[in-house]
Amino acid sequence: MFKHAADELPGYGILDVERMRKADAFAVQSGVASLALMERAGESVAHAIMRRWGPRRVAVLCGPGNNGGDGYAAACVLAAQGWPVTLFQFGERSRLQGDAAQMAQRWTGPVEPLDAFRPGAFEMVIDALFGAGLSRPLDGDGAAVISAVNSAALVRVAVDVPSGVNGDSAKADGVVFDAALTATFHRLKPAHLFEPARSLCGEISCADIGIPPGWQADAPPLARLSHLAGLSLPDMPHQSAAHKHQRGRLCVLAGGAGATSAARLSAEAGLAMGAGLVTLLCPPSSLMEATGVALPVMTRALREESFAEALTHHRADACVLGPGAGLGERLKDRVIEALKTGIALVLDADALSVFADAPSRLMDALHGKAVLTPHSGEFERLFPGLLNQSVSPLDAAKHAAAASGAIVLLKGPASVIAAPNGEAFINAHASARLATAGSGDVLAGMIGGLLAQRIGPFEATVSAAWLHGQAGFLLPPGANAQDLTRQIPVVLGAALDERARQRVLGWLLR
């Protein structure tokens, strides 16, 4: 669950550790005292805690750097509100420097060495040991204390990121603080979004600490967090003169006999997203099967004509290829033919895996109106080694988009949508109930439905991913992909209503 300062939501920027340092430096250069930033950070940690829990015995574990200084600042606020607080310092308190040293001087309560900490004496522990800057696994006293904390029955709160987590890569090697709440500042970092670090952060609170406008020039965000306010959606007016062809024409390639269900899900999802005419293009062997069950969409047989000719015949504005299509040379040829038409395409599942033995053939044919939607395994087949060589999934997706010239949606608990020009969004708005067979086929169709309505490929992918996640939150336990498809009009209608409300509000406030 993510909570953010209200003014940060529409284009919520993701920063790595170095960019966060630059944003802090910009604030100082703009006249904000660095100690004031630390004070506000500590206050935000304390307030995040007090909003969730009542007073209790608290141990604050403070490290040797600025993360420890944030811990001292939080301790001062909690103690002033009557909370019983004890500080445990890693290393000598006298060796603290700069703002951390000044903040430590304000603390008048007990300070003990870290190795004196005993979890059983407390009901809450605040981890202010290392923060996002640690780039190696924990060892020594730090590892021993955190192991003891993780085994104890108490509330665990992390400052910035849990100690043991790499803020940039989201890696969590060795012993890592397992937090119920992570209180961070200004902007999220990759560790707050990607696994395994994301699960170790617990609930995440991100506070404004007063970095003034203009910081983006020195610290341009790596990506933005997708949100309802940033969706690109088609206009859907209630006009008597409107007809289906104005709403866009989507074609979906079906598989052979016994393998049409994935493509049917994509086709129905495209229709639910508002495409005016959706056609399931079927090999002759599966036409009767598809005709019998694909009631909301049209079904047509693929005869001897080329796939490009079929798309032209149906005047397709967009096409989805891959779900249940089967692996074989014919699919390769159809993908290449479709790419040559220049229409907007979604390449999913088999349309990606079929090129595992010849990824360069696909790469050479891709263009900016193509959307690739791989999960990590499919991504590895197309871009061998790139995930392991990259700092994070965000870094990998951005490199893949630049190399391919296409939009890349790297699916995961936090999905990355990257464009060839370096722009990227992270969609962390998703429910675990989407982990059901066919969910990805629905997403492919949702993207295709927006593409058919002439929404740009990058914008369509960002918007469909968020709406797909929102639909997942409406699913009851045990729901399947067909149930997910039925939720699309609900979430799309709610998003359109919210956009209309915002327009009216904007007009009233002019």
Image: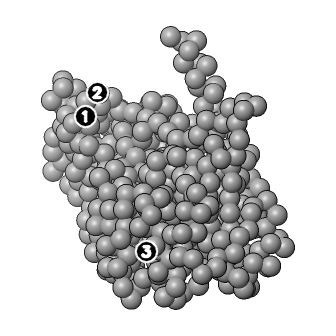
Q: Along the polypeptide, which appears first: circle 2 or circle 3?
A: 2
Amino acid, disc 1: Trp
Residue 34 lies in quadrant: top left
Position of residue 359 relative to residue 163, above or below, is below
Judge from the rendering whether residue 213 lies leftward or rightward of residue 25; answer left or right.
right
Between the residue at mark 3 and the residue at mark 1, the CA separation in whole angstroms equals: 44 Å
Residue behind mark 1: 215
Q: Residues within 10 Å of mark 2 (few under 14, many from 20)?
A: some
Q: Along the polypeptide, which appears first: circle 3 or circle 1?
A: 1
The answer to whether one can see residue 497 in this image is: yes
Between the residue at mark 2 and the residue at mark 3, the CA separation in whole angstroms equals: 49 Å
Position of residue 41 relative to residue 263, above or below, is above
Secondary element under disc 3, as helix, strand or loop, is: helix
Secondary element under disc 2, as helix, strand or loop, is: loop
Return the residue nearer the eye: 82 or 96. 96
Q: Which mark, residue 97?
A: none
Amino acid, disc 2: Pro
- The residue lying at 73 percent from left, 47 percent from top is 489
Q: Residue 452's spot in the image, x, y percent? A: 57, 52
Task: Tell us which disc is closer to us: 2 or 3.
Answer: 3
The answer to whether the residue labelled 2 contacts the one labelled 1, judged by CB atoms less than 8 Å apart, is yes
The answer to whether the residue labelled 2 contacts the one labelled 3, judged by CB atoms less than 8 Å apart, is no
Between the residue at mark 2 and the residue at mark 1, the CA separation in whole angstroms equals: 7 Å
- The residue lying at 29 percent from left, 52 percent from top is 421
Judge from the rendering whether residue 377 lies leftward or rightward of residue 303; answer left or right.
left
Amino acid, disc 3: Ile
Q: Residue lying at the far right in this picture: please name it.
A: 292
Residue behind mark 3: 336
Q: Residues within 10 Å of mark 3 (few under 14, many from 20)?
A: some
Q: Residue 159's spot in the image, x, y percent? A: 39, 49
- The residue lying at 64 percent from left, 76 percent from top is 302
Residue 388 lies in quadrant: bottom left
